[in-house]
Amino acid sequence: MNLGFHGADRGVTGSCHLVECAGKLILVDCGLYQGHREIEQENAEPFGFDPASIDFLLLTHAHLDHCGRIPLLVKRGFRGEIITTDASRELARLVMLDAAHIQEEDAAHRARHAHHAGREAPLGPLYTTVDAIDCFDRFGRMAGYGEPIDVTKGVRATFVDAGHILGSACVLLELEEAGRRRRVLFSGDLGNPGRPILRDPQRPPRADVVLMETTYGDRLHRPLEPSVQELYESVRATFERGGDVIIPTFALERAQEVLYFLREGVERGVLPASMPVFLDSPMAISATEIFRRHPECYDVETRELFRDGRDPFALPGLRITRLASESMAINEVTGGAVIMAGSGMCTGGRVRHHLRRHLDRAQSSVVFVGYATRGTLARRIIDGAHSVRLFGDELPVRAHIHTIGGFSAHAGRDDLLAWHRFVGASETVLVHGEDDVMHSFAKRLEDTKVVMPQLHDQLEL
Ligand code: ZN
């Protein structure tokens, strides 16, 4: 029995772990590396194993850094079975298709540049839309929370609610080989308890070995309620000035969460019932549809809303704009609207058009509700840039900028520690975190041997 590390080692993206047991190879997640150019170049490197030799892939959740290399895995020969929850299967299809589309567009852009510069054409896309569609046939059995699946002889998997995004799970593997038994738990990404819509992370089962994420292993989150109030306050103040509110929005989870809070604001009378809210992101619109189909993933309050025939993501003034022409028509609105558009870090997508129109308007505001990594347009604005470059023009930043920090989808340090104590593992593998964060988290762990693997390391189970 053996565990191999092929991604998210000493970094937060590219999750990919390989279990070898009873003559079978089982992969847990196959995510994309995301970030600056050097990190993304890792995606094209060999996996560290032969994709054709993999028998099963267990997917913890549908974020790109956990499922985004699956089309490449299939392109390079993987023909095994993908096992995940129903909601993750639906979301992963959407995420992989969107990623393939972006890869194709980026490759075409690079080719045009090379052509103009008289250089040789660079490499094509990492994978195409057709490669992403090829993955759909690989999805097999569906996992229900708490229901063990006999993956193959000697390997039983149980998906446990991780409370991170719709369909997310921790995966417990009960392994048996030549009379030896080991319980190995993969945390996937762990949710931040106390948020609406989803249930809190479930208490984990006990295990001998735990492999866990450490994204926020060195910090505590701000409480949610003050953040929600801050959101309402920024909307009200902007409307009083006669401006519009731009919210750069991640399509999965954050978009639905913001809709949920805006609806509550209207129902509580804190926000005007007549305010137009534009959901201007085809990906977020599709994701919201998938959310509506999976009430089995919700917490008690949200399930009750559905039972009473109410939609937790619907507002009186909600307008969804799938078509580019509908998106452009938003420009005719002047004052008093909330515009939610992707991408969350403003690296692409429709939000850049709305920023071009509103960044230099002192009445308007831009409200950031998610994480923005270094080097992105969102980060430059958050860090207080007086002007930014957009579509080739230098644009002054006159709009009010709000950064609301309490909406994290990841567990903070103390919740991670409490989760770890419940598992009671004698051996702990830390992944999915920055190097310094992991070391600081490791110092707080007691009664366990801690391993922080490097890429392609192996661990005997
Ligand atoms: Zn995640």
Image: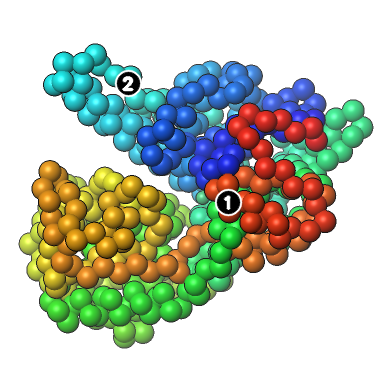
**Res 170 seen here:** no
Residue at the (56%, 64%) spot, across then down: 219
- Tell me if 333 is positioned left or right of 20 in this view: left
Image coords of residue 300 (percent x, y)? 56, 71
Q: Nearer the viewer, residue 132 or 428?
A: 428
Image coords of residue 460 (percent x, y)? 79, 32
The 10 Å Cα crowd at callout 2, few under 14, some 14 to 19, many 20 or more, is some
- SS class, disc 2: loop
Residue at the (64%, 65%) spot, across then down: 415
Q: So how many labels did they put on this image? A: 2
Image coords of residue 396 (percent x, y)? 13, 59
Q: Is residue 109 above or below residue 424?
A: above
The amino acid sitting under disc 2 is Gly
Q: Nearer the viewer, residue 200 or 302?
A: 200
The amino acid sitting under disc 1 is Asp
**Res 310 seen here:** yes
Residue at the (25%, 65%) spot, across then down: 366
For residue 414, which quarter of the picture?
Answer: bottom right
Q: Is residue 81 above or below residue 148?
A: above
Q: In the image as oriented, which residue stretches furthest toward the bottom?
A: 269
Which residue lies under the disc numbered 1? 436
For residue 100, which quarter of the picture?
Answer: top left
Image coords of residue 329 (percent x, y)? 10, 56
Residue at the (60%, 32%) spot, across then down: 455
Q: Nearer the viewer, mark 1 or mark 2?
A: 1
Is label 2 within 8 A of ligand 1 (CB to nearest ligand atom)?
no
- Tell me if 273 is positioned left or right of 421 in this view: left
